[in-house]
Image: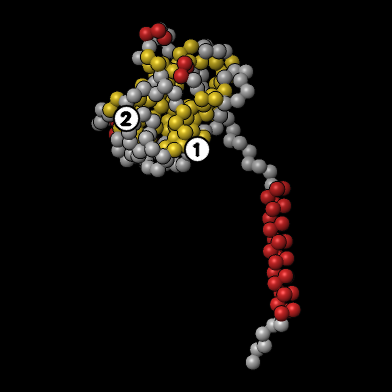
Amino acid sequence: MIEKPTRGLAGLWLGAVMFAAVAVHAQAQAQSQSEPAAAPPPPILMPRLVPADPQPDAAKLNDGLAVRYYFAKYNHIRELVDWMKYDDGVQGKPLVMIDHADTVGNVLTTTNSMLVGAHITGFIRFADLGTYRLRVTSNDGVRVTISGRKVFEDPGVHKASTSPDMVYDVTEPGWYPLDILYYQKKGTSALQLHWQPPGAEGFVPVPGSAFKHP
């Protein structure tokens, strides 16, 4: 018959196990602390963009950005583009800003919480000479086009994620055509456009004063 270990031997065995677990944890922690933090993604240098020509008369434009909604299930931006060829969509309430943080509930200015596509159009104003940095956060897919040039795309279904910095040296201040395609499939939704103007300390939402639409 196999005898049960005495309490003393059991205590020694338990202590050894605990010591080994602590040692493994300490080793893993030390390794994680010694590993360098992941480097931020490299910035995207935007191509030369041309301001609207002729420049619009801001006094004759409306505040914010126009938005048209398309209600269907999308898994990629190209599916929204294809859908728009056959569906006129529904004109939505203009977007004063693009600062829709990741949340459940209504998507942008709709009353729907899922299966929403949006085509956002208007102008963005780069008022000052110098370097602007932009970031777009989306959940799900997004495509950002300025002056007819695609500057960023994250087309698939994904959780809220932020683009690398999009860097643009403004040599011609003014109003630039802005076109954003965006969709949300299900769950939470997010769409934010933030920037760091020349000389600014950090990123802030692009203010409503920088957006206009016909």
Quadrant of the image containing the N terminus: bottom right
Residue 94, image x, y percentages: 36, 22
Amino acid residing under circle 2: Tyr
The image quarter containing residue 116 is top left
Residue shown at the point (54%, 25%) measured from the top left:
204
Amino acid residing under circle 1: Ser
Cα gap from disc 2 to disc 1, whole angstroms: 22 Å
Q: Vertical placement of 193 versus 141: above or below?
A: above
Residue 49, image x, y percentages: 48, 18
In this view, which residue lies farthest toward the bottom?
Answer: 1
Instruction: Kindly tell me whether residue 2 is visible in this rendering.
Output: yes
Q: Pointer 1: what residue?
A: 161
| Front residue of 78 and 89 | 89
Which disc is residue 69 wearing? 2
Q: Vertical placement of 189 versus 20: above or below?
A: above
Return the disc, 2 or 1, that comes first in the chain's sequence: 2
Residue shown at the point (46%, 42%) measured from the top left:
159
Residue shown at the point (70%, 48%) measured from the top left:
33
Query: Is disc 2 surrounded by few (<14), some (14 to 19) or many (20+) residues within 10 Å?
Result: many
Query: Is disc 1 surrounded by few (<14), some (14 to 19) or many (20+) residues within 10 Å?
Result: some
| Front residue of 32 and 63 | 63
Q: What colour-coding does the image apply?
A: secondary structure
